[in-house]
Image: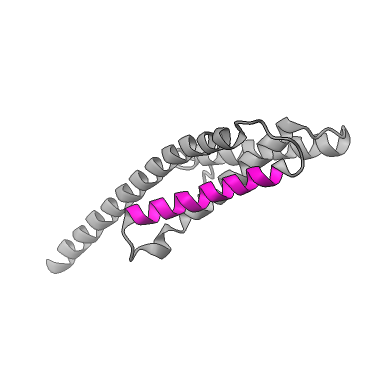
Amino acid sequence: MKIIDRHNFFGIVCAVYTILSLGKIILEAIVQDIFGNYQENLLVMFFLSLVATFVLSQHYRFQEYPLLLCIVVQYVVLVALVMLVTWLSGRFHPLHEDAYKDMFWSFTVPYLIGVVVYYISLFHDVKRANQSLKKIKESGGHN
């Protein structure tokens, strides 16, 4: 029995990489007493990735609303969260004068790419499911 196959290979690589990266950050903080901007940035990226993935995964709860509205609301909520995280980090150490703009673009570009990939995959899966249902209905009607 194959646990890792061509369908889940990339996802498993990403999960292993994430676990190793987080483990490295935690070990450096504990063993070497090092926790700088590099580690903080990686943890913020992980947190934002986690939240963005969760928000995208909740699209099915809003199926009664137009898709574009759902996408825009998800994006606005996430950008507000990014700005809040940036503001909170500014309470602990000084921010660069372009910090908000940099965070906006650093989040927006990957998020938009992720949204496009996610919704194209979703539409592809729905289309495939509809085709399967059609085949089942057609074969059921001939018996």
Q: Residue furthest left?
A: 142
Q: How is the image coloured?
A: one colour
Residue 99 shown left or right of residue 59 in the figure: right
Residue 51 shown left or right of residue 136 in the figure: right
**In the rendered structure, does residue 5 fall within the stretch colored magenta?**
no
Q: Which residue corresponds to the image point at 86% horizontal and 39% vertical from the top-left?
A: 30
From which residue to which does the magenta span run?
Answer: 68-89
Q: Position of residue 116 (x, y in %)?
A: 38, 41
Q: Quadrant of the C terminus?
A: bottom left
Q: Which residue corresponds to the image point at 26% horizontal and 52% vertical from the top-left?
A: 127
Give the tally of numbered discs: 0
Q: Position of residue 43 (x, y in %)?
A: 68, 40
Which image quadrant for residue 132? bottom left
Q: Position of residue 10 (x, y in %)?
A: 50, 37
Work out whether residue 27 or residue 80 is closer to the camera in this orientation and state it: 80
**In the rendered structure, does residue 81 fall within the stretch colored magenta?**
yes
Above or below residue 71? Residue 64 is below
Residue 30 shown left or right of residue 119 in the figure: right
Q: In this view of the protein, can residue 41 be seen by the observer?
A: yes
Q: Residue furthest front?
A: 97
Q: In this view of the protein, can residue 21 be seen by the observer?
A: no
- Principal SS element in the magenta part? helix
Above or below residue 111? Residue 130 is below
Residue 131 shown left or right of residue 88 in the figure: left
Q: Which residue corresponds to the image point at 74% horizontal and 39% vertical from the top-left?
A: 23
Q: Which residue corresponds to the image point at 46% horizontal and 59% vertical from the top-left?
A: 58
Q: Position of residue 128 (x, y in %)?
A: 28, 51
Above or below residue 101? Residue 55 is below
Which image quadrant for residue 26? top right
